[in-house]
Structures are given as structure tokens and as C-alpha cells.
């Protein structure tokens, strides 16, 4: 975990120093941005047999690196929903704290900006799993690697305020027989610091 934090701090330091030059010369709707997104994830793997979806949100900061690139850091909270009619896991719960970083490539720097993104990082998973069928109970916190590939649209409402929608494919390494994969949909707002 220490190496992960050192890598994030290094990338952030380089990005901030580079972005100060890049953001001062840009005239479009992109820039260093503070954002908040609400998310909904539909689980698609065997993990779906127990938890069918999750919901939550991200808070983050994106660093403008040039005409169409941003470096993104985000953290959040997600709550998994226990599937209805799953008597073997009655009373189970799971929540996650995602710590992710990655980047976006914007095709334009106009009022309407489509993008593609890649994120990766770690999910800190707090779980209480009550498997009545096998008479086992797990109550612990684990950390798992996650990556995400997606696309979206950022719409400039004003020069400083934008609206965003996104659709992403997630893959989190939960266990070998139940990868935590799914499709994540997000909607949110950002404030561009100019």
C-alpha cells in the first residue's frame, strides 16, 4: 500500500507542475476540475448471484495536462445491494471505498466533449458475509485491485460548471470464483478551476 501511495503522490506532483503551464494557455471548456459523481453499478459475474448491484458516489480532482488530456484522482463510497430471494446470505452486507487514478482523452475541447477513460487503483472492501448454507461468517476488510475502461460526455453549462454522464466496464479482483465485474453508470457535476 505504501508503494501505491508513493506512486500516486509522484504522479500528482508531476501533473500539477505540468498542468499549471497547460491550463493557463487553454481557451476551451476543459481545465483543472473538482467533481462529484453519483454512480450505479450492475454486477455481471458470479458475484451477481449474491449482490446484484451497487450504488454510491465519487469525489475527485482532474488535472488538465494539455489540449485534450486529463489526469484523474477520485475516492468514494459504494454500498452493495444483497440480491432479493437469496436466503443463504441473509444478513450479509458489503461496502467499498474506492481509491482510483487514471486518465481521460477528450476528442474535443468545446462545450460538448466526448471522452474515453481508463482508471485503476484499489477498492477497500468492508464485508460481513453470513453464509447460512455452509455455516460460515466472514467479517473483515480486504483491499483489491480494480481497473475500469469507459466512455462519456462532459457538457459545459458555463465556462466553470459542467455536467457529465459516463458508462464504464469495471473489473475488480474480489475472488477467483467471483470476480466483481460489472457496468457502471455515472452522472455528476464538475467545477473548473480557471
Image (cartoon, grey):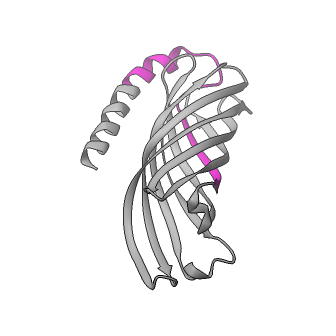
Rendered image quadrant of residue 7: top left
Q: Is 81 in front, or is 50?
A: 50
Q: Where residue 72 sits: x, y (%)? A: 49, 35
Q: With 56 as the anchor, is 139 left or right in this view? A: left
Residue in view at x 46 percent, y 82 percent: 134
Residue in view at x 40 percent, y 27 percent: 15
Q: Is 91 inside the magenta-drawn segment?
A: no
Q: Where residue 111 sits: x, y (%)? A: 73, 24
Residue in view at x 45 percent, y 44 percent: 100
Residue in view at x 67 percent, y 45 percent: 188
Task: Please tell me whether residue 119 is drawn above or below residue 76 in the rendered image.
Answer: above
Seen as rendered, the residue at the extreme left is 2
Rendered image quadrant of residue 193: top right
Number of numbered discs: 0
Task: Please tell me whether residue 178 is drawn above or below residue 2 in the rendered image.
Answer: below
Magenta span covers which residues?
Answer: 17-42
Q: Is 119 in front, or is 113?
A: 119
Q: Where residue 105 sits: x, y (%)? A: 57, 24
Rendered-image quadrant of the C terminus: top right
Task: Please tell me whether residue 125 is drawn above or below residue 169 in the rendered image.
Answer: below
Q: Where residue 62 sits: x, y (%)? A: 51, 34
Amino acid at each position: 500500500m505504501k508503494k501505491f501511495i508513493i506512486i500516486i503522490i509522484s504522479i500528482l506532483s508531476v501533473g500539477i507542475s505540468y498542468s499549471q503551464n497547460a491550463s493557463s494557455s487553454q481557451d476551451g471548456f476543459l481545465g483543472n476540475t473538482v467533481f462529484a459523481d453519483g454512480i450505479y453499478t450492475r454486477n455481471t459475474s458470479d458475484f451477481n448471484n449474491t449482490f446484484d448491484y451497487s450504488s454510491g458516489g465519487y469525489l475527485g480532482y482532474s488535472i488538465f495536462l494539455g489540449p485534450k488530456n486529463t489526469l484523474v484522482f477520485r475516492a468514494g463510497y459504494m454500498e452493495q445491494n444483497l440480491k432479493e430471494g437469496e436466503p443463504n446470505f441473509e444478513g450479509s452486507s458489503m461496502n467499498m471505498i474506492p481509491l482510483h487514478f487514471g486518465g481521460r482523452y477528450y476528442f474535443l475541447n468545446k462545450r460538448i466533449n466526448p471522452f474515453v477513460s481508463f482508471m485503476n487503483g484499489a477498492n477497500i472492501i468492508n464485508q460481513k458475509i453470513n453464509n447460512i448454507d455452509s455455516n460460515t461468517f466472514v467479517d473483515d476488510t480486504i483491499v483489491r485491485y480494480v481497473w475500469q475502461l469507459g466512455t462519456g460526455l462532459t457538457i459545459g453549462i458555463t465556462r466553470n460548471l459542467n455536467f457529465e454522464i459516463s458508462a464504464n466496464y469495471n473489473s475488480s479482483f474480489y475472488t477467483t470464483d467471483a470476480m466483481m465485474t460489472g457496468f457502471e453508470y455515472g452522472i455528476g457535476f464538475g467545477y473548473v478551476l480557471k
